[in-house]
Amino acid sequence: MLSAGVFSDGYFRLVSGRSRRELSLVKAITIDQMAQEFGVPTHIKVDVEGHEAAVLRGGRATLSSASPILFLELHSEMIASDRGDPCAALEELATLGYSTFSLRGGPISRNETFQKPISRIVAKRVHG
């Protein structure tokens, strides 16, 4: 990973094509691995600077079985500028049976989510 960002202090980006001397090796762990090691969470905060969909994919088993409440910071503008799919995290949430809400508790649509470069939302699993 490449140390980047406003002050490059604890902010890393996944990059390719850079010299190994510029990069830092960072251990990654999935939500599912964390749940196995530390116990099943009731709430999860996801603030991963554009890698939200990957984090959700790494937690499919835990999110499907335990249905923790999620607090997400979605970086749609950053994802789009890196040629990624800003909808990927919301699609993953929908696949897992989660509905999205504003921080005030009301439902929030995809369009509302993408009106800002960074959106903070809550996701709860719909049981039915």
Image (cartoon, grey):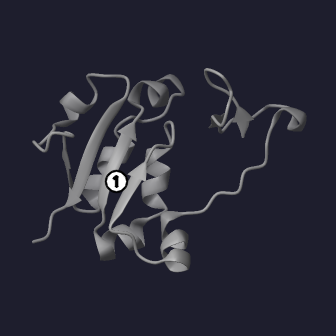
Relative depth, front residue between 98 and 34:
34
Residue 127 picture location, percent across and down: 14, 70
Q: Which residue lies furthest to the right in this view?
A: 21
Q: What's the residue at 31%, 22% (across, down)?
A: 116
Q: What's the residue at 45%, 59% (across, down)?
A: 57
- What is the quadrant of the N terminus in the image? top right
Residue 123 picture location, percent across and down: 25, 52
Q: Is residue 127 left or right of residue 118?
A: left
- What is the quadrant of the C terminus in the image? bottom left
Q: In this view, does 76 lie to the left or right of 29?
A: left
Tell me how many marks there are: 1
Q: Is residue 100 above or below residue 21?
A: below
Relative depth, front residue between 38 and 84:
38
Q: Is residue 87 above or below residue 29?
A: above
Relative depth, front residue between 112 and 5:
5
Specify the quadrant of the image occupied by residue 124: bottom left
Q: What's the residue at 37%, 23% (across, down)?
A: 117
Q: What's the residue at 44%, 46% (across, down)?
A: 52
Q: Is residue 35 above or below residue 24?
A: below
Specify the quadrant of the image occupied by residue 125: bottom left
Residue 122 picture location, percent across and down: 25, 48
Q: In this view, does 89 lie above or below 64?
A: above
Tell me the SS state at disc 1.
helix
Q: Is residue 63 left or right of residue 49?
A: left
Tell me which amino acid carries mark 1.
Answer: Glu
Mark 1: few, some, or many residues within 10 Å (few <14, many ≥20)? some
Residue 112 picture location, percent across and down: 19, 29
| Disc 1: which residue | 92
